[in-house]
Amino acid sequence: MPTDMKETIADAAKRLLMEKHVKKLTVKDIVEECQITRQAFYYHFEDIPDLFRWILEESSRQFIRKAQESGDAEEMLKYFFLMSINAAPYIRKGLQGNYREELEQLLRQDIRGLFERTIEEKQLYQQYSHSEVKLFLRYHSQAVMGILKEWTEEDTRNLDQIVHNIYLLIQGKISP
């Protein structure tokens, strides 16, 4: 059971998207599902994209905490993919709705943040300029977004190899 109202609202939004197959998620749907007032929703969130942002940020925080416990950059990348695979049904539903741009932007930011932390922690790309590193980050972030958009069951079965290859790419040990 959620411990605070933000979690309650987030759980209701996820339930509406997945179980009730709502095509266009609205604040009205969410407040009815939670049995709260619109004021209560707007007290916690500005709008639906703000709710999605919070859900992704909370998922990222949990992911980062678990990944940092491992202390291994490749393992962190694997945690990221596992989190993405678990979130994929919600993300697909959200991307089908009218919040596609906001969700894609949030996902790109999360992916980029993961790579920035990995590069910083592992002191990768020290020999490159700041602008070159920014280009690498954009390239790798877009590549992973593309992979996630077209993720298959076979990819899930080959997750370890995919993660290992991406990790080697990030480290510059193999070329794309």
Image (cartoon, rainbow, N blue to C red):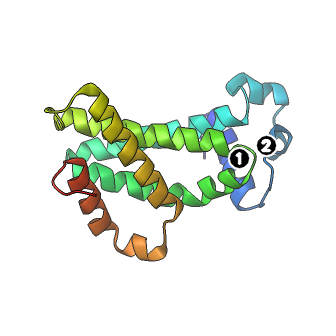
- Name the quadrant of the C terminus: bottom left
Report x, y in % for residue 43: 73, 22
Report x, y in % for residue 105: 56, 39
Residue 47 or 135: which is nearer the viewer? 135
Q: Residue at x 50, y 36 (%)?
A: 57
Residue type beneath disc 2: Ile
- Secondary structure under the numbered disc 1 in the rendered image: helix
Q: Residue at x 24, y 61 (%)?
A: 164
Q: Quadrant of residue 55?
A: top right
* Mark 2 or 1, nearer chain start: 1
Residue type beneath disc 1: Ala
How far apart are the two marked residues, 2 and 1, measured between alpha carbons? 6 Å
Is residue 158 positioned above or below 130 on the image? below
61 relative to 74 in the view: left or right? right
Q: Residue at x 75, y 45 (%)?
A: 98
Residue 152 or 30: which is nearer the viewer? 152
Would you say the residues marked 2 and 1 are in contact, meaning their CB atoms lie under 8 Å apart? Answer: yes
96 relative to 132 in the view: left or right? right
Report x, y in % for residue 18: 69, 60
- Asked if one can make out residue 3 in the rendered structure from this viewpoint, the answer is no
Q: Residues within 10 Å of mark 2 (few under 14, many from 20)?
A: many
Is residue 18 positioned above or below 35 on the image? below
- Secondary structure under the numbered disc 2 in the rendered image: helix
- Asked if one can make out residue 172 in the rendered structure from this viewpoint, the answer is yes
- From the image, tell me which residue sits under label 1: 13
Which of the numbered marks, if any, corresponds to residue 125?
Answer: none
Q: Residues within 10 Å of mark 1 (few under 14, many from 20)?
A: many
Is residue 129 positioned above or below 169 on the image? above
- From the image, tell me which residue sits under label 2: 30
